[in-house]
Image: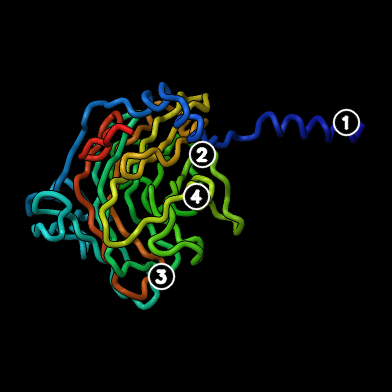
Amino acid sequence: MMLMLVSLASVIAAQTRAPYPEDVTAATLADAAALTRLELPGDVLHTEGFEDADALDGWYNFDTSGERPERTEVVLDGGEARSGRGALRLTTADNGGDSSGAGPHYWFHPGHDVVYFRRYIRFAEDYDQGNLNHVGGSLYAVAGDDRWAEMGKAGLKPDGDDRFGARLEPWRDWGRNSPPGAMMLYTYWMDMKPDRSGPYYGNNLMPPKERQVVLERGRWYCLEHMIRANTPGQADGEMAAWIDGDLYIHLTGFRWRTTPDLRLKRVSLDVYVHSSERANRVWYDDVALSTGYIGPTEKRESP
């Protein structure tokens, strides 16, 4: 009888286990209709080329005072811009091994259920974060109308009615990848797995090793990622990312949220080095938000 009870408990646990997303990239790339659906254009929500000194006036900082963060600058110098005359330049400080960061956030309440976020990024030729950093840009869903809500929640698992989101960022893999690292989606959501040490740090969602892209320093990349929120009660959410217009990863089967009121409404352009022992610099340019695929500013040539 005891064995039967244990077996029944195991079956129930397996049936109720939280879903985890599936990497369907290969299938999507092999199916022209599926790729076309994923890359359908939508309505543009916002663009920013940093062409004017006041380009950051519609952005804000972690600090609830709204003060512009240090080392966050619009530089009107064609030599630093990708296009036009301006770009956003972010610089971390040599902080003796403590953390250092810079960068603004953009808020678009009441939000959307599907958002594509494109930006161009360039790392300085000597960029080297050591091991851990957050850089590349994030897209987040937040409950309510407080633009500062749910910040500072590293290590905590979302409940399904408060927040979810992901950063498209490089990872050194503890020195196995050259700086800045191989691209991944650093993701928080209600069904994420805990770190081996206990806390719920962002899950590293990335392609198999043979498909991973390690960025080069000193050149511009077009990064784009999208999140499609799930129908509450169903695991039908999606996430995908592109590098220079090529699909990098496509994931399905997310339970992002439990309520339709939780919608995507915040992006960030940032750099944050966990143990900052030197100055690091990164540039962003040609930012766009849309309800559909955006792609590079230059159209890809047909194969």
Disc sitting over residue 190 in the figure: 2
As measured in the structure, the alpha-carbon distance from the residue carrying label 3 to the one carrying label 4 is 19 Å
Disc nearer the start of the sequence (3/4): 4
Quadrant that contains the C terminus: top left
User: What amino acid is labelled 2 in the image?
Assistant: Met
Q: Is residue 170 above or below residue 277?
A: above
Dot 3 or dot 1: first in sequence order is 1
Q: Mark 3 vs mark 1: give the one in front.
A: 3
Q: Nearer the viewer, mark 2 or mark 3?
A: 3
Q: Residues within 10 Å of mark 2 (few under 14, many from 20)?
A: many
* Residue 204 visible, this orientation: yes
Which is more foreground, mark 4 or mark 1? 4
- Looking at the rendering, which quadrant does residue 276 occupy? bottom left
Q: Position of residue 119 (x, y in %)?
A: 26, 45
For marks 2 and 4, give the one nearer the viewer.
Answer: 4
Q: Can see residue 63?
A: no
Q: Amino acid at mark 4?
A: Asn
Q: Which secondary structure lies at badge 3?
A: loop
Percent x, y of residue 164: 42, 40
Q: Disc 3 marks which residue?
A: 275
Task: Report the amino acid beneath label 3.
Answer: Ser
Regarding mark 1 in the picture, which secondary structure is present there?
Answer: helix
Q: Residues at badges 2 and 4 in contact (C-beta under 8 Å)?
A: no
The residue that disc 4 covers is 204
Q: Which residue is nearer to you in this view: 261 or 247? A: 247
Mark 2 and mark 3: span between their CA atoms?
28 Å
